[in-house]
Structure formats: structure tokens, C-alpha cells
Amino acid sequence: MKQSLRLEGIPVYALEIDRDETPYQSVDEIVAYFRTRIEAHAYACVVAEFDHLAHTRSLPTGQIGDGIRAAKNLVFCFGLTLPDPLALAMRPRSIGIAETDRGFVVTFLEAPMPVVNAAMEDWAKGLLGDAR
């Protein structure tokens, strides 16, 4: 996994997967994979699925980067703690899944809780190889 800083220092994790590195053939299959992981987690909850590509295409001035074939966000929340109202600014979480000409790119923002980050990293790495 790569970690980079975007938009004024927000850590973003990204996993690039070539088509021959995963048994999954589409963004929808990968979204379904993540959905099962989230639903099976003791304190995670699916909130929504957002088709970012369809939304952007529907805008008169929408722009889509070269090579992006599909792009969805799976929105979810771990909800383990709610220490104060400011915590709401960092929730819910989202995993982005894009299909490109080469394969897939899975992205998410770093979570403030290491246990949450570890779960998202494990889920993403589970896409590699024969994860089914």
C-alpha cells in the first residue's frame, strides 16, 4: 500500500491492482466484496454506495480522467466511539474503487484509529490473489 498526502496533508492510502492480480472482474464485484467485509465486522455499518462516474458524467461541466472506466465509493462507518461532536467531521468513512485501463485502484483516507486503518488495509489486500 502507498500512503500519500493530498489536499493539505490528508493521508490517502492507495492500492493499484493489475487485472491478473485479482479474481474480481469489475468495480461492482469489488464493491460487493467490501460490502461483505463491512457487514461481517463487529462494529461497522454500510451507509451508501455512490456511483461517482455516473454522477460526474451527468454534470454539464463534469470531467473524468483518462482511462477511468468506472468509479464508485462505498460509504460506511465503524462507529466504535463518538468522543465529541468534532469526530463527526471525519465520519463516515469511504473506500473508493476505480476501474482503469490497467486494472483497479482502491483508495481510502487514513483513519485516526489504528485498528480501523488495519481493517481497511486488510480488506484491500484481500483483493489480491485468490481471495474468494
Image: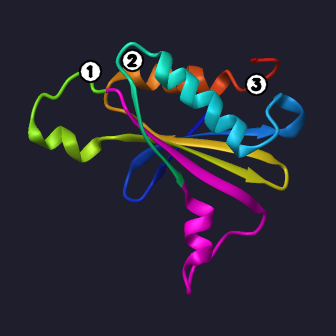
- In this view of the protein, which residue sits in the foreground, 34 or 15? 34
Q: Residues within 10 Å of mark 2 (few under 14, many from 20)?
A: few
Specify whether 132 is left or right of 13.
Answer: right
Q: Is residue 69 magenta?
A: yes
Quote the CA–CA distance across marks 2 and 3: 21 Å
Residue placed under numbered mark 1 in the picture? 80
Q: Are marks 2 and 1 in contact (CB under 8 Å)?
A: yes
Q: Residue at x 81, y 21 (%)?
A: 129
Q: Are marks 2 and 3 in contact (CB under 8 Å)?
A: no
Q: Residue at x 69, y 42 (%)?
A: 28
Asked which secondary structure carries label 1, the reply is loop
Q: Are marks 3 and 1 in contact (CB under 8 Å)?
A: no
Q: Amino acid at mark 3?
A: Leu
Of tags 3 and 1, the one toward the viewer is 1
Q: Amino acid at mark 1?
A: Leu
Q: Locate residue 75, reporting x and y percent.
A: 44, 42
Question: Which mark identifies residue 101?
Answer: none
Q: Amino acid at mark 2?
A: Val
Residue placed under numbered mark 3 in the picture? 128
Specify whether 129 is left or right of 89.
Answer: right
- Magenta residue span: 51-78
Q: Is the residue 26 above or below the residue 35 in the image?
A: below
Q: Residue at x 75, y 69 (%)?
A: 66
Residue placed under numbered mark 2 in the picture? 115
